[in-house]
Image (cartoon, rainbow, N blue to C red):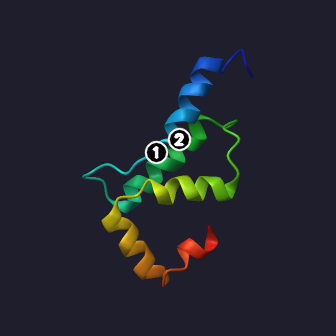
Amino acid sequence: MKRFFLISRYIKAKSEISMFRQRADEAFCETWERFKMMLRKCPNHGFEDIAQLSIFLNGLRFDTNMLLDAATGDRMMVVI
């Protein structure tokens, strides 16, 4: 794996995942797709499912987070 996925590339990809943020003009579905693409680009990222969900939710804009909370009846925070 190291031969095809350099350690510097791994560190950069993992850092980008952990610092994930929704862009100002980005819709929720676009944000979700971009996050999933980042995870696929670094298959050995090592983040557990709950950590991935936490990174994604914490990276959402305030307004998007409020809509998601309203749509789920504030149950997203219970999951984390």
The vertical placement of 10 against 14, above or below, is above
Residue type at the position of mark 1: Phe
The extreme bottom residue here reads 73
For label 1, the residue is 20
Residue 48 percent location from the top left of the image: 70, 51
Which circle marks residue 72 in the picture? none
Which residue is pictured at 42% across the width and 73% down the height?
A: 68
Which residue is pictured at 62% across the width and 26% down the height?
A: 10
Q: Quadrant of residue 46 in the image?
A: top right
Asked if residue 53 lies left or right of residue 21, the reply is right
Q: CA distance from mark 2 to mark 1?
A: 5 Å
How dense is the environment of label 2, judged by Cα within 10 Å: few (below 14), some, or many (20 and up)? Answer: many
Residue type at the position of mark 2: Ile
The vertical placement of 37 against 53, above or below, is above
Residue 20 percent location from the top left of the image: 46, 45
Do the numbered discs 2 and 1 sit on residues whose CB atoms are within 8 Å? Answer: yes
The extreme right residue here reads 1
Which residue is pictured at 49% across the width and 80% down the height?
A: 74
The vertical placement of 40 against 61, above or below, is above
Placement of the C terminus among the 4 image quadrants: bottom right
> Which type of secondary structure does the marked residue at label 2 adopt?
helix
Which circle marks residue 17 in the picture? 2
Which residue is pictured at 35% across the width and 66% down the height?
A: 64
Placement of the N terminus among the 4 image quadrants: top right
Residue 57 percent location from the top left of the image: 49, 60
Q: Quadrant of residue 45 in the image?
A: top right
The vertical placement of 4 against 45, above or below, is above
Asked if residue 73 lies left or right of residue 63, the reply is right
